[in-house]
Image (tube, rainbow, N blue to C red):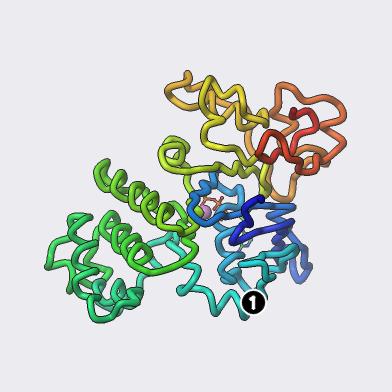
Amino acid sequence: MKKEPILKVKDLGVSFSQYTKGLRRRDLKVITNLDVELYEGEILAVVGSSGSGKSLLAHAILGILPDNSTTEGSITYKNKELTQKDKEKLRGDEIVLIPQSVNYLDPLMQVSKQVKISIKDKTNADKIQRKIFNKYGLDKNVDKYYPFQLSGGMARKVLLSTALVSDTKVIIADEPTPGLDEKSLNEALQNFRDIADNGCAVLMITHDIEAALKIADKIAIFYAGTTLEIANVKDFENGGENLRHPYTKALYKALPQNGFKPIKGNQPLPNELPKGCLFCDRCEEASDSCKMIRPDSKEVRNGMVRCLYAT
Ligand SMILES: Nc1ncnc2c1ncn2[C@@H]1O[C@H](COP(=O)(O)OP(=O)(O)OP(=O)(O)O)[C@@H](O)[C@H]1O
Ligand code: NI
């Protein structure tokens, strides 16, 4: 029997209504037909360049998009389509966000307290909080610090600690590792792996494909607000010959160990999307059809891809 996803995002669309000149309003669609699935015990890494829609996906799942946005599609958790109310109930409890910005810390609360709020086992909360701080090299003095007293790296570690001590079903980590030294980075990655191995589903958003390849099970490749491919980590072995989309293959070749070959051109802006495939103007294999037809997602070799020619 096929395993059921714990969380499923299907055909997600996100638009913002904006005022342009004077009082004229326009809708800017920034996410289109975006699909991802999370499974218990698995880490899905979401990679994609700046502006590809990674954070908005996280915010849509948690129900924290701004008021001037509208969404389409569905987000299903444990086989139930979530309403805004459901999302608010699950947030911070069964679904936890590690935000991209450290400004999400409460400026008026000592950091050890902020971590302890997330610990269900209240009798051992002090011990558990100290243990995780120790792991990240935050000494006892730090317990009493307020967020303004932390360096960027320390604030990251506090945010990570908050999520990692919680007894949650789904962790959504939005760029959890920038600014961390090598040792803390590896600790953090290992923690995500341990948490997943204990049955939690983890969605890890990152610019760092190499970090993703170290610990993830699957990689979702975002581009201009949609998912171009969902690959298994092992598809990145053997010269990447099992990868399905020309963009993923190009990303693979851009990795340092594979020759650093850059991809020419830029990701299109939301208001300048091509009619056909979103990657067509940078794709070396694009045909006339690619310029006309936006490819639907299809299942190929146990993964997902949007390309007319993927086999
Ligand atoms: N409140 C908003 N109003 C209008 N457009 C927005 C808003 N928030 C995000 N966008 C646009 O939506 C797109 C996706 O943004 P998002 O923050 O999800 O990107 P990202 O992949 O997380 O990028 P980064 O790697 O820089 O964090 C971008 O083009 C961004 O400019
Ligand atoms: Ni982001």
Give the secondary structure at mark 1: helix
Foreground residue, 80 or 137?
A: 80
Horizontal relation, residue 244 to residue 143: left or right: right
Foreground residue, 307 or 169?
A: 169
Residue at image location 39% in from the left, 66% down from the top: 103
User: Mark 1 CB in 8 Å range of ligand 1?
Assistant: no
Horizontal relation, residue 51 to residue 134: left or right: right
Answer with the quarter of the image where residue 166 lies.
Answer: bottom left
Horizontal relation, residue 204 to residue 311: left or right: left
Is residue 42 at least partly visible in the picture?
Answer: yes
Answer with the quarter of the image where residue 62 lies.
Answer: bottom right
Q: Is residue 49 above or below residue 75?
A: above
Q: Which residue is mark 1?
A: 84
Q: For label 1, count other residues whose C-alpha is less than 10 Å away and answer few (under 14), some (14-19) or many (20+).
A: few
Q: Is residue 63 above or below residue 205?
A: below
Is residue 19 at least partly visible in the picture?
Answer: no
Percent x, y of residue 77:
62, 67
Q: Is residue 239 above or below residue 302?
A: above
Percent x, y of residue 187:
28, 48
Amino acid type, mark 1: Gln
Residue at image location 73% in from the left, 40% down from the top: 299
Query: For the C terminus, which image quadrant?
Result: top right
Answer with the quarter of the image where residue 88 lies.
Answer: bottom right
Percent x, y of residue 136:
22, 55
Foreground residue, 262 or 197?
A: 197
Location of ligand 1 given as a quarter of the image: bottom right
